[in-house]
Image (cartoon, rainbow, N blue to C red):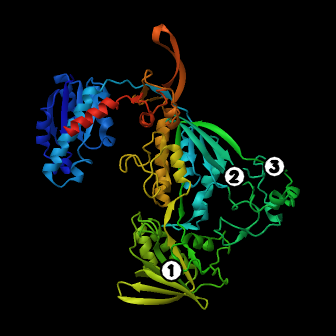
Amino acid sequence: MQRVGVFVCWCGSNIAATVDVEKVAQTLKQEPGVVFSTHYQYMCSQAGQEMIADTIREYGLTGVVICSCSPRMHEATFRKTCQRAGLNPYMVEIANIREQCSWIHKDREAATEKAVILGRAAIAKVHLNAPLTAGTSSVKKRALVIGGGIAGIQTALDIADAGFPVDIVEKKPTIGGKMTQIDKTFPTLDCAACILTPKMVDAAQNENIRIFAYSEVQAVKGFVGNFRVTIKKKARFVDETKCTGCGLCTEKCPQKKVPNEFNLGLDNRRAIYIPFAQAVPKVATIDADYCSMLKTGKCGVCSKVCTAGAIDYKQQDTFLEEEYGAIVVATGFNPIKLDKFDEFAYSQSKDVVTSLEFERLMNAAGPTGGTLLRPSDGTHPKTIVFVQCVGSRCDDSKGKPYCSKICCMYTAKHAMLCREKYPDTDVYVFYIDVRTPGKNFDEFYRRAVEEYGVHYIKGMVGKVVPENGKLKVQASDLLGGRQLHIDADMVVLAAAIEPDESARPLATMLTASMDTNDFFTEAHPKLRPVESPTAGIFLSGACQGPKDIPETVAQASAAAAKVIGLLCKDQLVCNPCVAQPDELMCNGCSSCEKVCPYGAITYINKEFRGPNRTTLLRRVAQVNGAVCQGCGACTVACPSGAMDLKGFSNKQIMAEVDAICR
């Protein structure tokens, strides 16, 4: 029989306000094997930890149950405390009486009863716990950054500056991401290209950074410190080692009517193209969907004019397999599609544009050379209406329930730039709320109103109707209590942002967690905001949630710091709670091997003594403890019940169930 100590935490008023902690401690003291039970205001405090350690020594405890908050919060803290006192850290159990009890109950009596039940279950499990010893595994000292926007670039630069090699995988032909399409940045109105381009060049010239542009992550295997990643390099039909980026091929290509995705379809490009002048790598790419040579075998103009001999029409996709110690996800965001917002006439009029399309129209490197012109007829707009929260903070079936965070500020920026460059333009902004939480953001918004004379109207636009070359805007002014009718030349929609479409399949490959909006979930929103719950996977930028450029860069550097901390280690302590097969029960069906996401299970032929002393050769499962991450998928899939999990065996789980039902 174990000698168990029970420690009930008040967690200030988080637990004690709903749960009678004294009664819980007294009740659990009556459980078999419990030799000590107490309660304290903050068990995770220094004084609380010292009390636990002293009690372990004084009472010779062989098991400890902490009734407190989620094990995700402080399990590691309490395990270290018990280990310092001479107790095996895996003889510690956490009963979550905060998130699973006090926070979801209003009735004190019901909450107290449930807290007792949870504590009783933890005690039942700790009686069956056995001391476990953690092994070690090596660390591959190279990092992978998936996504080459400003978040990915900053993360890669910080890791590389610490002396570790890092690879950037970017699915577009060039790194840079959305920031390459932006004209100026708020709240300083700095030129976006002037900030971003030097970083792109630094990444390209850094000896510790390799850039895999026009590439995608195809498969991920392994575990923290030892990931094996398959990278697909898509065929450019241009030899990157030979192309000089002179642009002659892009000038001579006869296929001129390919929609330019960099300018969001507002103009056309050639079938062979370099996305923009500062592209990194500055290498041409042939669009196979439009190239006559690739489709019909007729043309070949680009090959004839290329003096470097870089054109290769027979180039194929290639696959590389690389090893990494850590992976950073920086897949970014996209504006949502506006198919469900026909009331704004986005599909009916070229003069109704999204904010990102408006960025390109205002950009000196954009389709109009920086001159703001109506897409429909090329004239200068005299009245512009900006509509906020298009798809943000709305019904799930139509848009996104969350605030996209950046829209208020970039709309203020657009309005200011319009009024500064074209003082004769009337600018209206319809909003629900103006949100300016960042440094100097509120001052920036006030400048738009007070200095530049932008008309901010609290209310929503109900309908936009194209009529006689104008856009008839019907809207409400909630503060004035009236309906407005404005004849606008352009309407700009601040579309909600969402994670890039590659996020969901990538999360599946990484076994990383996502929320209901397809943003990657952090390990803890306050204490571990740049780490994924999956060890070795880190989060950078808008893949984790909407954020502006300063916040993105800050998070990118934070993710890099976590990666550096991991890569600095020569050995990692493995999780000892790994799967173990019962070879006598295993029938060699391979079910567990198929579901294992880490490739930790293999099969061997093993000799067994049969009837009449005969030797039988049977196929049985074998688990690599250094690779297994203790996810438990194999224990569920095993039809014969041969697979078990150390620390979470079937006996331990059933003991908890019995204690709950008692």
Residue type for callout 2: Pro
**Residue 440 occupies quadrant:** bottom left
Q: Position of residue 6 (x, y in %)?
A: 18, 33
Q: Is residue 658 visible?
A: yes
Disc marking residue 314: 3
Residue that carries the numbered disc 2 in the rendered image: 281
Q: Residue at x 50, y 44 (%)?
A: 560
Q: Quadrant location of the N terminus?
A: top left
Identify the element where label 3 is drawn: loop
Q: How far is disc 2 from disc 3 in space, using C-alphas?
A: 21 Å
Disc marking residue 376: none
Question: Does residue 17 lie above or below 49 as drawn?
Answer: below
Left or right: residue 600 compared with residue 362:
left
Residue type for callout 1: Glu
Q: Position of residue 658 (x, y in %)?
A: 24, 35
Determine the residue located farthest toward the front in the rendered image: 612
Camera-side mark, 2 or 3: 3
Camera-side mark, 2 or 1: 1
Task: Tell me the crowding category of disc 3: few under 14, some 14 to 19, or many 20 or more residues within 10 angstroms, Cα based.
Answer: few
Q: Position of residue 165 (x, y in %)?
A: 59, 38
Tag 3 and tag 1, C-beta contact below 8 Å: no
Task: Tell me the crowding category of disc 1: few under 14, some 14 to 19, or many 20 or more residues within 10 angstroms, Cα based.
Answer: few
Q: Nearer the viewer, residue 604 or 459?
A: 604
Question: Does residue 566 lie above or below 312 as drawn?
Answer: above
